[in-house]
Image (tube, coloured by chain):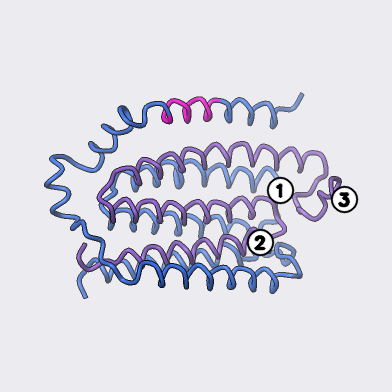
Chain colours: A purple, B blue
Amino acid sequence: MDDLFLNQFLLLGAMLFCIGVYGVLARRNAVLVLMSIELILNAVNINLIAFGAFWGSIAGSVFALFVIAIAAAEVGVGLAIVLLIYRNRRSVALDDVAEMKG
Amino acid sequence: MVAQSVFFYLFAAIILFSAVRVVTSNNVVHAALYLVAVLAAVAAEYVLLAAEFVAATQILVYIGAIIVLFLFGIMLTRAKLGSDQDLTHSHWALSAATALLMFGVMGYALVDQFHWTATPMPADTRLVSVAGSNSATVSDSVFTAYLVPFEVVSVLLLAAVVGAIVLARKD
């Protein structure tokens, strides 16, 4: 790994994170927003694994596993909520869900 | 350039191109399939960092399970199959500016802080010196140092499963 730099992975993670942020902000479909959140979580995982390799510690890998488990739980509950929204309003456009807007 | 660098940039290009397509595609199913490409290329980057257990988990859990959940979500919400111009806000340019600004700040901070320090652990020597694979080390530490968080995650997953069933059930 003499040839790989920590910053390569950190910058890749930062780019992926920002693409995910753009998706969360710009998408109207709730399922696509959940997909963008997956991009953000993957960016975090790249950072965790890169720092784990950098310090020679296994903690990075273990935390990445926890993040993957939490992501699975989040997608399950998130898609159930999206399904409920669809069942009630026949649409998953996020602009239409504005009852709690002040 | 050594093979590791070549493959790093190859997979990084796949990740970035597919991620941009995930957030810009006009077709929901295409977005899900581009997400598969992102997840697989991220798994390849994990292998480059000698974290092969996480890479295998990524493929099993993300590509095997989460993508299937997404496809179910797309079909159950009867998303328009085919091109749909209504998936992106009209104020997407503002979102893009926000994301670019964030990347500018983060990129500056990272380059300023970490410069170009090589990752000090050579992958091949590490795999030999730890006397076992990354998988063995991960399992050892999950069932010793991280046992309590591991059990908490199990309970959290159970709670999420029950919660998802309660939410999505027709009553």
Q: Residues within 10 Å of mark 3 (few under 14, many from 20)?
A: few
Tell me the residue that label 3 is attached to.
A102
Q: Taken as a whole, is the magenta stretch helix, strand or loop? A: helix
Q: From the image, which quarter does the N terminus of chain A lie in? A: bottom left
> Is residue B150 inside the magenta stretch?
yes
Q: Position of residue B50 (x, y in %)?
A: 25, 52
Report the residue that reaches farthest toward the front. B113
Q: Count of labels shown? A: 3
Q: Residues within 10 Å of mark 1 (few under 14, many from 20)?
A: few
Q: Amino acid at mark 1?
A: Arg
Task: Using the rendered image, report if marks 3 and 1 lie on a common chain.
Answer: no
Name the secondary structure under disc 2.
loop
Q: Chain of mark 2?
A: B
Indicate whether A68 appears above or below B24.
above
Q: Amino acid at mark 2?
A: Gly
Q: Residue at x 60, y 61 (%)?
A: A21
Q: Position of residue B168 (x, y in %)?
A: 69, 32
Q: Chain of mark 1?
A: B
Tell me the residue that label 2 is attached to.
B82
Q: Residue at x 66, y 57 (%)?
A: B81
Dot in front, 3 or 2: 3
Q: Chain of mark 3?
A: A
Indicate whether A53 appears above or below B168.
below
Tell me the residue that label 1 is attached to.
B78
Region rendered in magenta: B149-158
Dot in front, 3 or 1: 3
